[in-house]
Image (cartoon, rainbow, N blue to C red):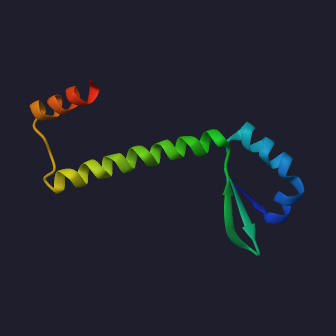
Amino acid sequence: MRIELVTTLKRQATELIAGLTKDREPILITQHGLPSAYLVDVDTFESMQRRVQILEGIARGEQAVQDGRTLTHADAKDRLARWLK
């Protein structure tokens, strides 16, 4: 991962963005020597968002099982059939 100063981002934004699109390597932006932000290309960001949504769905499902909020296979099929109508 590349690390760049916020001043570099200000001065060379076009070049940094072009590099992101080409390399797909995130850039850590620092300000006053401290991490401030990550710069990532759109495809990588959207992929990360989809992964987070999938993981959140799995976590909700695991919590439902722990809470006893489950259905039999037959009940689930009936609910889906009604929902799909």
Residue that sits furthest to the right in the current view: 11
Residue that sits furthest to the front in the current view: 85
Q: Residue at x 77, y 75 (%)?
A: 32
Query: In this view of the protein, which residue sits in the foreground, 70 or 85?
Result: 85
Is residue 26 found left or right of 6 in the rendered image?
Answer: left
Q: Residue 25: image x %, image y %?
A: 67, 46
Q: Residue 18: image x %, image y %?
A: 80, 41
Q: Residue at x 35, y 46 (%)?
A: 57
Is residue 50 found left or right of 80 in the rendered image?
Answer: right
Q: Residue 28: image x %, image y %?
A: 69, 59
The image quadrant of residue 2 is bottom right
As displayed, is residue 18 above or below residue 65? above
Is residue 40 found left or right of 76 in the rendered image?
Answer: right
Query: In this view of the protein, which residue sits in the foreground, 6 or 77?
Result: 77
Tally the numbered discs.
Answer: 0
Is residue 69 found left or right of 52 in the rendered image?
Answer: left
Query: In this view of the protein, which residue sits in the foreground, 57 or 28?
Result: 57
Q: Residue at x 67, y 62 (%)?
A: 37
As displayed, is residue 84 above or below residue 18? above
- Quarter the C terminus occupies: top left
Residue that sits furthest to the bottom in the current view: 32
Query: In this view of the protein, which residue sits in the foreground, 66 or 39?
Result: 66
The image quadrant of residue 81 is top left
Q: Residue at x 15, y 45 (%)?
A: 70
